[in-house]
Amino acid sequence: MIDGIKLLRLKEIIQSEYGIDSNINLTTMLLDEDRALLNTITDEILVNGNQCKGTDDIIEAVAHEVAHLVKPSLKDGSEKFNRLWTEIFKNMGSIYYARERRK
Ligand SMILES: [Zn+2]
């Protein structure tokens, strides 16, 4: 797996931090332009393995979808959305790497 990222750890983080019960799966089947997708029926987050090359890429892509789930009313590209996305990305990253260091 890319950089040996722990998708289960990310799943636990979005569950404990945002109450989101989604599976996160890395896939090669997405169109090239999409870094990640949200399956709104299953709430599954699909990460594009063709676009995301490292751990931070994946956390950032997952954070984007989490932002949509946290505030469904915010539109892609809006300032409010981008601020929320950045905030979630930083929060997830700091928890993710803190757990890395503990091992
Ligand atoms: Zn989006």
Image (spheres, rainbow, N blue to C red):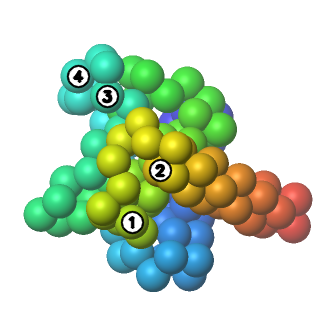
- Asked whether the viewer can see residue 62, the reply is no
Cβ of mark 4 under 8 A from ligand 1? no
- How packed mark 1 is, by other alpha carbons closer than 10 Å (few <14, some 14-19, many 20 or more), is few
Residue at the disc numbered 3? 34
Do tag 3 and tag 4 residues touch (Cβ < 8 Å)? yes
- The amino acid marked with disc number 2 is Phe
Residue at the disc numbered 2? 81
Cβ of mark 3 under 8 A from ligand 1? no
In the rendered image, residue 88, in percent from the top left (x then y), is placed at: 60, 58
The alpha-carbon separation of the residues under discs 4 and 1 comes to 25 Å
Do tag 4 and tag 1 residues touch (Cβ < 8 Å)? no
- The amino acid marked with disc number 3 is Asp
Identify the element where label 3 is drawn: loop
The alpha-carbon separation of the residues under discs 2 and 4 comes to 23 Å
- The amino acid marked with disc number 1 is Lys
As displayed, is residue 28 above or below residue 82?
Answer: above
Residue at image position (17%, 59%) is 40
The alpha-carbon separation of the residues under discs 3 and 4 comes to 6 Å
As displayed, is residue 32 above or below residue 78?
Answer: above
Residue at the disc numbered 1? 71
Cβ of mark 2 under 8 A from ligand 1? yes
- The amino acid marked with disc number 4 is Leu
Identify the element where label 4 is drawn: loop
Residue at image position (36%, 76%) is 21
Q: Nearer the viewer, mark 2 or mark 3?
A: 2
Residue at the disc numbered 4? 31
In the rendered image, residue 36, in percent from the top left (x then y), is placed at: 36, 39
The alpha-carbon separation of the residues under discs 2 and 3 comes to 17 Å
Identify the mark nearer the N-term, 1 or 2.
1
Q: Nearer the viewer, mark 3 or mark 1?
A: 1
Q: Nearer the viewer, residue 96 or 5?
A: 96
The alpha-carbon separation of the residues under discs 3 and 1 comes to 20 Å
